[in-house]
């Protein structure tokens, strides 16, 4: 959630930043009106409270002087009723503002480039050069079928479109990748955590998937529970409504989960293969930290995900997302895109985001900073999407006869 105190203090600056992210004038006007109504309600309550305090002092003076207090007592009692009503109005206005704020995205950092969509993202650098093939490289679904690694038809038979079944080396490589990534992240200081794949509504509100993206989530019928779209949700919400000791920060975590997404906003895109599925495996990085260290840790997370791809000898590039392509909760994001020779293009395989204190305000995650409680910064990112990494291995390591070479770093994991 955006800082509502900042909204009250400098609405014009908040409005400027939100407009960069595409928030429309109507929503901004609603935010301004809700903010003004809360200000008026607070002013009214404070005026009545000041009057009550004044009458209370007068009440004490009357008693000391032996004056008749009946009329003053009646006024005090009547004002108490009005104060209670004013406090209730203030509470209602506060709740209305907070409800509206739950649907408003995070403000982008000033360094984020302006733009409308992914075409305006900025390439930061390329890592490793794409291989030159002496033959026409195939796409991963052809290679998967030829090698008997992945069966899309049986996946569809079991669960519908955008599901698949992995066999033999395909299944073994998925497991190897998960173990390799978790171990790699652990060596970079991220502690492994195993979390539930179902969470409640509060957890999803905390990280920003709800209320805006409910149509993209799989809900458990008859319960206010959802399948997780990413391990970011349970990992971040481990500290929901907690005050973390200063010395415990930063808290760096990594976890493997399956992820479940309806992909409602991606109809017609990547309908073939494993690029965009309703259920997929992913290893996640999450960090909870202080604001003064969040940029350093952000860079560490980007480097960690990039280094995994380098270890797998997969060409990739780092891209800074523009304001129009930035996610709902992100203040800034760097995407990592891996080269897919079968498609002859780079495709997203990781997205590393710093949400600043946006998620922390929603999930009420704080730390003790001297005598005051301060909201933490939270960061998250993929390291990596397992299915897309497998796709990249297949396409980049294919041979002319259709066989696929296994990356050296994964071979020990296949012997376990």
Image: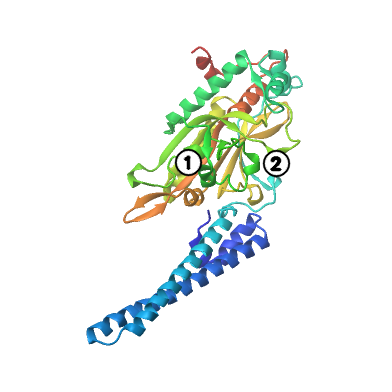
Q: At 66% across and 36% down in the image, what residue appears?
A: 262
Q: As rendered, which of 190 and 120 lies closer to the eye?
A: 190
The answer to which of marks 1 and 2 sits earlier in the sequence is 1
Q: Which residue is mark 2?
A: 265
| Occupied quadrant, residue 26 | bottom right
Secondary structure under the numbered disc 1 in the rendered image: helix
User: Where's residue 186, x and y in %?
Assistant: 44, 29
Secondary structure under the numbered disc 2 in the rendered image: helix
Q: As rendered, which of 305 and 223 lies closer to the eye?
A: 223
Q: At 44% across and 77% down in the image, what residue appears?
A: 47
Q: As rendered, which of 117 and 73 lies closer to the eye?
A: 73
Q: Is residue 386 above or below residue 38?
A: above
Examine the rendering and report whether any part of residue 302 can be seen: no
User: Where's residue 97, x and y in %?
Assistant: 55, 61
User: Where's residue 94, x and y in %?
Assistant: 51, 62
Q: Is residue 227 above or below residue 137?
A: below
Dot label at residue 236? 1
Q: At 51% across and 67% down in the image, what residue appears?
A: 89
Drawn side of residue 184 relative to residue 123, left or right: left
């Amino acid at each position: 959630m955006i800082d509502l105190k900042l909204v009250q203090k400098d609405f014009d600056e908040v409005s400027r930043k939100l407009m960069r992210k595409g928030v429309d004038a109507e929503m901004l006007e609603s935010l301004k009106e809700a903010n003004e109504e809360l200000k008026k309600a607070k002013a009214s309550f404070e005026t009545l409270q000041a009057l009550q305090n004044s009458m209370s002092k007068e009440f004490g003076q009357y008693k000391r002087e032996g004056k008749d207090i009946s009329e003053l007592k009646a006024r005090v009692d009547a004002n108490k009723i009005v104060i209670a009503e004013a406090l209730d109005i203030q509470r209602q206005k506060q709740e209305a503002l907070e409800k509206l704020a739950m649907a408003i995205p995070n403000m982008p950092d000033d360094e984020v480039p302006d733009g409308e969509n992914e075409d305006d993202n900025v390439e930061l650098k390329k890592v490793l050069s794409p291989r030159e093939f002496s033959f026409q490289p195939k796409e991963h679904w052809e290679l998967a079928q030829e090698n008997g690694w992945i069966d899309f038809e049986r996946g569809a038979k079991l669960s519908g479109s955008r599901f698949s079944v992995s066999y033999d080396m395909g299944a073994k490589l998925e497991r190897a990748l998960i173990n390799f990534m978790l171990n790699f992240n652990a060596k970079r200081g991220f502690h492994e955590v195993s979390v539930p794949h179902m969470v409640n509504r509060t957890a999803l509100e905390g990280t920003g998937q709800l209320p805006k993206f409910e149509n993209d989530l799989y809900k458990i019928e008859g319960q206010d529970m959802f399948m997780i779209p990413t391990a970011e949700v349970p990992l971040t919400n481990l500290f929901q409504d907690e005050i973390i000791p200063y010395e415990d920060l930063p808290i760096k975590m990594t976890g493997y989960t399956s992820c479940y997404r309806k992909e409602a906003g991606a109809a017609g895109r990547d309908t073939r293969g494993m690029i965009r599925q309703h259920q997929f495996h992913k290893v996640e990085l999450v960090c909870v930290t202080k604001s003064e260290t969040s940029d350093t840790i952000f860079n560490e997370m980007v480097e960690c995900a990039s280094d995994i791809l380098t270890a797998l000898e997969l060409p990739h590039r780092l891209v800074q997302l523009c304001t129009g392509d930035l996610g709902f909760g992100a203040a800034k994001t760097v995407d990592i895109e891996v080269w897919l020779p079968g498609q002859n293009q780079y495709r997203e395989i990781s997205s590393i985001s710093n949400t600043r204190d946006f998620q922390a305000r929603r999930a009420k995650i704080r730390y003790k900073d001297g005598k005051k409680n301060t909201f933490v910064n939270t960061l998250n990112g993929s390291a990596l999407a397992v299915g897309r990494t497998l796709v990249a291995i297949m396409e980049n390591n294919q041979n002319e006869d259709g066989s696929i070479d296994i990356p050296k770093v994964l071979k020990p994991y296949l012997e376990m």
